[in-house]
Image (cartoon, rainbow, N blue to C red):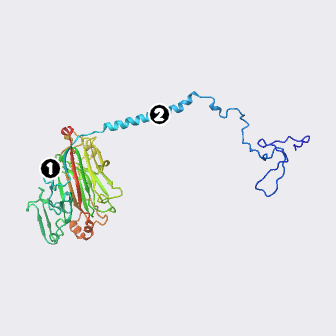
Amino acid sequence: MTASPMRPGTPETVRNPFGDEVPSTTPVVNPFSPYPSRPTSSSGFSSAVRQGMAPRYFHSRRVRKGEVDQPWKSIKDPKEKWVTIIPLIGLGLGLALAGFLVYDGITSVVRHNYCPVFSDDFTGGFNSEVWTKEVEVGGFGNGEFEQTTDDDENVFIQGGKLVIMPTLQDAKLIEGNTVINLTANGTCTSNVPSNCVTITNIGNGTIVQPVRSGRINTKKGATIKYGRVEVTAQLPAGDWLWPAIWLMPVNNTYGAWPQSGEIDIAESRGNNYTYAQGGNNIVSSALHWGPDKNNDAWWRTNVKRTALHTTYAASAHTFGLEWSQKYLFTYVDSRLLQVIYTNFDQPLWQQGNFPLSDSNGTRLVDVWAQTGRDQTPFDQEFYLILNVAVGGTNGWFQDGQSGKPWVDGSPTAKQDFWNARDQWYPTWQGGGQMTVSKVQMWQQCDGNEKSS
């Protein structure tokens, strides 16, 4: 059936441009309706499709068949190629610059030659031609609580490893008035009388050193001026233990400590990881340098490194030092895992920014200026020290932290520490010693060290 003609005066019907005309007899099928379908008009508003025919897809009436759908492709702008070329040029220049910087960085690294000075794996026993056991009771300037001995009880070789083990002092020497005079028995290794004598005075609470331990050095057998040091060791676990691997100058060329310098490769505390200042899960490295002990600039050259998911008392680690005229750095296990890195790119006196005078008004003088070298005082021969200290009154263990049983300023500090031994001594059992498996020292030997 065709559409009925329009009546005169009636506007022309607007047809749906997206619809198809179908015979009125063609039913519109609604698959979801329960009622029979009815024929529809073919006037143009039907959305039905002929039975059996596929639906027509939308086609723009503004772009006729055969015309270009993307006219911008037919006309090329000659400047468009630079949109691709310029980024590629920039990428190429960036890669070239990065390659140059990497190459320049690698080639600018100073590669020194090193000659072996000393190597000890302790399989041959204790080498007394190189190592010296220090015997003192003076506290080594830190108010330490240990008496260092030359006894095999405190420093010995076991299983091919060097062991430095702290032990309790003989209680009889503490419970009654006593004098320990190392000068009298000829064992004291210090030339300072106060480092060789200690007493117990029950009346005023003064006691001899409450702990015995070990401290050894290579001063008579192995020293270096610029070079490398590596010590493979397992640090101790135990409250108030203070292990250290460090170097001191053979001669006080520039004056008393710290004018002539000190190099601490690794220091730690035996307390566990809960200790407020960090226990045996942390090691620190530092340089000590300054015009006097009250102006020690160690805090400018001090860095800590935390063990990764373990402690330095759980297994052995290699603690190293690399030292030259231009830099000094320490590391743990790998030279890539650096702890402290110091550049000698300006005189240390300038880096220290020291005051003009000390607390007494005495003018501070730059005793290092005479050399004209930026690295002074770290331009002299140094020797290696290994030790396990105990306690102390210099602040290494802060007052009031984590149950510390003594106060640094107290005249009875050692007595208070001794009285708390039932708390701290059990923590030493099974791991309170430093175990050293290897020590190596190399001297820089490319000729530069002789004139610097």
Specify the quadrant of the image occupied by residue 4: top right
To which residue does mark 2 refer? 90
To which residue does mark 1 refer? 221
240, 157: nearer the viewer: 157
Apparent side of residue 272 relative to residue 16 in the rendered image (left or right): left
The x, y position of residue 395, in whole percent, is 26, 59
Quadrant in which the C terminus appears: top left
Specify the quadrant of the image occupied by residue 409: bottom left
Quadrant in which the N terminus appears: top right
Q: Does residue 195 lie above or below 99 as drawn? A: below
- Secondary structure of the residue carrying numbered label 2: helix
Q: Which residue is drawn at the image coordinates 56% and 30% (left, top)?
A: 80
Asked if residue 163 shows in the view, the reply is: yes
> CB atoms at circles 1 and 2 under 8 Å apart?
no
Apparent side of residue 153 relative to residue 333 in the rendered image (left or right): left
Tell me which amino acid carries mark 1. Gly
The x, y position of residue 49, in whole percent, is 78, 46
The x, y position of residue 248, in whole percent, is 19, 50
Specify the quadrant of the image occupied by residue 425: bottom left
Q: Which residue is drawn at the image coordinates 84% and 50% (left, top)?
A: 39
- Secondary structure of the residue carrying numbered label 1: loop
Q: How many marks?
A: 2
What is the CA distance from the residue labelled 1 to the residue labelled 2? 59 Å
Q: Residues within 10 Å of mark 1 (few under 14, many from 20)?
A: some
Q: Which residue is drawn at the image coordinates 76% and 54% (left, top)?
A: 31
Q: Residue furthest right?
A: 8
Q: Does residue 353 lie above or below 427 as drawn? A: above
Q: Residues within 10 Å of mark 2 (few under 14, many from 20)?
A: few
Tell me which amino acid carries mark 2. Gly
Asked if residue 393 shows in the view, the reply is: no
Give the mark, 1 or 2, whose residue is nearer the N terminus: 2
Apparent side of residue 145 relative to residue 67 in the rendered image (left or right): left
